[in-house]
Amino acid sequence: MELRHIRYFLAVAREGNFTRAAAKIGIGQPPLSQQIRDLETEIGTPLFHRVPHGAELTEAGSAFLDIVVQFPDLAERAIRAAQRAGRGEVGSIRVGFTASAAFSPSVPRIFRDFRRAFPGVDMTLEEANSAQLVTGLKDERLDAVFLRQDVVAGDGIRLHVISAEPMVLVLPAGHPAAQGGKVALTELRDDALILTPRAVGPTHFDKVVTACRVAGFEPQLGQSAPQLGSVINFVAAELGFSLVPKPMTQLQANGVVYREIKGDVPIAELSLAYRGNDISIALRNFVSRTLAAHSDTTPSEIQK
């Protein structure tokens, strides 16, 4: 039994006449009659009484009609649902991001634009540090992540740099260097440097330490902070200074000031990472829209 048999049956049942039903659906009356006979043969009982003025449903035909009357609409709904799924307009994606990534103007805009373009896709967001995001990606608990890390260990993980932002100094408000304009890193050689542990964010840790070494001194590592937000609070407590991506200057805290760096300025890259193999259509749409909005970036596959 095929869907066309159901359509033909419904046409005859509605019209009560084979000739009118055939004209309605655009086929000849003899082929329509043959299709109905084939359907009756498959079911094993007549569905219509052939009468001089047309056709009337048998008791079996009425019972059949009660069930199959919904089939064409269900088929259309199924087709539309499949087409939407094929275009990635339904489904779900799980996206992670670091605390500093949330301050980048790119990330909230990406989330907003995707939700507007694909309202039927359930997007779940999770904030965590870089190490946790990478683990979530490799464990397939997350589908894509925004992080400030330029090396992701694991086969099949793709990484795209979507923005490059200068770092700035964050100083205690009472620090002598906080009173002027740009500050050279060498002015802070005797101050403690506040960072998150290297295991939490190795790329950020290494870039800040390298910037100090390029400036001509080995930094004195001070209190370790669990995340960049805590770094700001520790600086406010006058435990030392730090460097953060410029978008984090939106985080205003009592007792700290942000200053641009004089001389060589380290760059904090914000990247999108995801599993390159066997990704869902919804995730493929998310990745393609993100990269289209940052078309000057080049994808790279990161190996172990």
Image: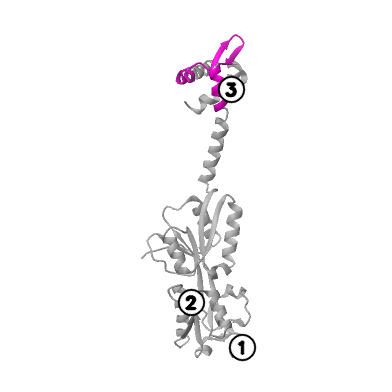
- Depth check, mark 3 against mark 2: the one in front is 2
Q: Amino acid at mark 2?
A: Thr
Element under disc 3:
helix
**Left or right of 247 on screen, residue 156:** left
**Left or right of 230 on screen, residue 158:** left
Query: Could one spot residue 291 in this view of the protein?
Result: yes
Crowding around mark 1 (Cα neighbors within 10 Å: few <14, some 14 to 19, many 20+) is few
- Which residue is found at the position 59% from the left and 55% from the top? 115
Q: Which mark is residue 110?
A: none
Most foreground residue, 172 or 118:
172
Most foreground residue, 142 or 237:
237
Tally the numbered discs: 3
Crowding around mark 3 (Cα neighbors within 10 Å: few <14, some 14 to 19, many 20+) is many
Label 1, on which residue? 174
- Depth check, mark 3 against mark 1: the one in front is 1
Query: Could one spot residue 28 in this view of the protein?
Result: no
Q: Is residue 61 magenta?
A: yes
Give the x, y percent position of residue 146: 51, 65
Give the x, y percent position of residue 100: 54, 71
Q: Which residues are magenta?
A: 38-67
Give the x, y percent position of residue 89: 55, 48
Q: Which mark sits nearer the N-terminus, 3 or 1? A: 3
Give the x, y percent position of residue 108: 59, 63
Q: Which mark sits nearer the N-terminus, 2 or 1? A: 1
Label 3, on which residue? 11
Q: Amino acid at mark 1?
A: Gly
Disc 3 to disc 2, C-alpha distance: 72 Å
Q: Amino acid at mark 3?
A: Ala
Q: Which mark is residue 196?
A: 2
